[in-house]
Image (cartoon, rainbow, N blue to C red):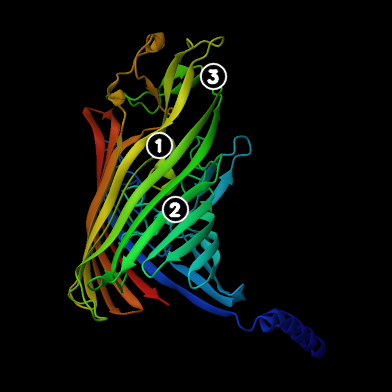
Amino acid sequence: MKKLFLITLAVAVSLCLPLTAQAKTEFELGGYIRLDAMWISQQTNNYALAGFNTRDNTPFGNHGKFMMNANATRFNFTIKGPELWGGKVTGFIEADFDGQMLNVNPNNGTTTATGSFNQAVLRLRHAMFKITWPEREVLFGQYWSVNSEMIPDVADSGAFCLFGATQFRLAQVRYTQKFGEYFDASVEVGSGQNGRWGLNLNSAYPLEGETSESPMVEAKLRYEQDLYGKAGWYGKPRGFYVGLGGGWFRTFNQSNNPYALYNTLGTNNFFPAAGQALNLTTRNDYGDHWLALIENFLPIIPTRSKSLAGTMSLAHQWWIGQGVSAWRLDLPANDRFYTWNGAGNNTAANPLSYTQQFIKRYGGWAQLQYYWTEEIYTNLNFGFEKAFGFNGMQRNNFLPGLAAFAGQPGFVYLNGVNIDPVNSSWRAGITQWYRPIPAVKFALQYTYMRTNYFQSLTAGSNTTNFGNCHSILANAWYMF
């Protein structure tokens, strides 16, 4: 017994030594416990509201379902460390339980996800540290991208993802410089991935989650000042703010898909189990993902006091870009297409030559928020995104056989037989918040979402190119 005690004491001392050596380091635990309960009118969407709707004529897809889980619960550690080169070192680690178990196919690198609402999987969200000086800051690690800093204050986890709001976490190095009292600018070099947070879940398109040819480069210029008072932003007073941002990176796509099935864009020609058989030549394509945005927080009914009661604000963001899956505004299989460049006749000896292109999109979101009292406030939200620049190519009819390759202008192919690209999507809703004390809040939210597809699809006698979705979400939060 004495020997066991001495061994235990020795281990405890050895563990405490590093902590003693860094006695100035402070650890702070944060996060929240959260329960979600949702009724939704479509089977394919989930409580995060981060997916496109299926069409209204999808068999068995448009009847309601009820869900309840606590997967959005998260925790974080803030580590306040020592000084380095005259700056303060701070670290931040955050995880939630909204991850997925991935099964990797060793033959082609694709993965499939498994899991359930009641068997949550731990997921890393943020892991970064920064060195802060009075006029500048350097950040290292995984964190929100420079252009994913402003997110609507809604009750669901998706927060208008795929419906107009930029939001993506990536590994990065970021430098921020202050200019006077009200201006600052950031430049970021990061990992240029696209897709579902870098996952590769689409067997029809193995390059989902691809690593880019170049790093992602982002920049943003910000101006923030209390010009005439403040209003509420995530429960805290905030003054006038405007930001101008942009980002770019380049991907490399090498394709060699001999005699594979491909679909075309056209009117009522989407058939998930069919397509045009093509001999495609190996083509090395470089594609540029880019984004430009402007965002603003505007106190409409401001206050000069700490109380938010009676205040009103408008937060909004607007953007334009192409290949915008990099900012979680699209999905990789959905954001690109192939155009025949006039070469080849679809034979093994003379395969078709094509060019990969990214879909261009524009969109944004707006949030009007009013505080009835210090504890009760309401958000009205709207967001959308839309493709542009196709010049009518989506209206070309499907042309079978080699007639399709006899000089038909603007003939477009999709990424695979099951790819069904979205033309536009939009979302609107209302969120009622009640926060009786700072540590506890409740929400009741109604959301309407609509997805418009380039192509129509016929199911039975019903033909449509759009899908609607309604949802009611209630949740409870305990923040610590």
- Specify whether 379 is left or right of 68: left
For disc 1, the neighbor class at 10 Å (few under 14, some 14 to 19, many from 20) is many
Dot in front, 1 or 2: 2
Nearest the camera: 246 or 126? 246
Q: Residue at x 35, y 19 (%)?
A: 410
- Asked if disc 3 and disc 1 are in contact, CB closer than 8 Å, the reply is no
Residue where numbered disc 3 is placed = 281
For the residue marked with disc 1, what is the amino acid?
Answer: Asp
Location of mark 1 (residue)? 335
Q: Quadrant of the C terminus?
A: bottom left
The spot of residue 449 in percent (x, y) is: 25, 48
Q: Earlier in the sequence, mark 1 or mark 2?
A: 2
Residue 300 shown left or right of residue 84 in the figure: left
Q: Which mark is residue 419?
A: none
The quadrant where residue 244 appears: bottom left
The disc placed on residue 219 is 2
Residue mark closest to the camera, 3 vs 2? 2
Q: Secondary structure at mark 3?
A: loop
User: How many numbered marks have been drawn onto this rendered protein structure?
Assistant: 3
> Judging from the image, what secondary structure is the residue with disc 2 in?
strand
Between the residue at mark 3 and the residue at mark 2, the CA separation in whole angstroms equals: 37 Å
- The residue sitting at the front extreme is 180
Q: Between marks 1 and 2, how big is the CA–CA gap?
A: 23 Å
Residue 331 at least partly seen: no
The vertical placement of 169 against 392, above or below, is: below
Marks 3 and 1, how far apart in space? 21 Å
> Do residues under tags 1 and 2 come within 8 Å of each other at their CB atoms?
no
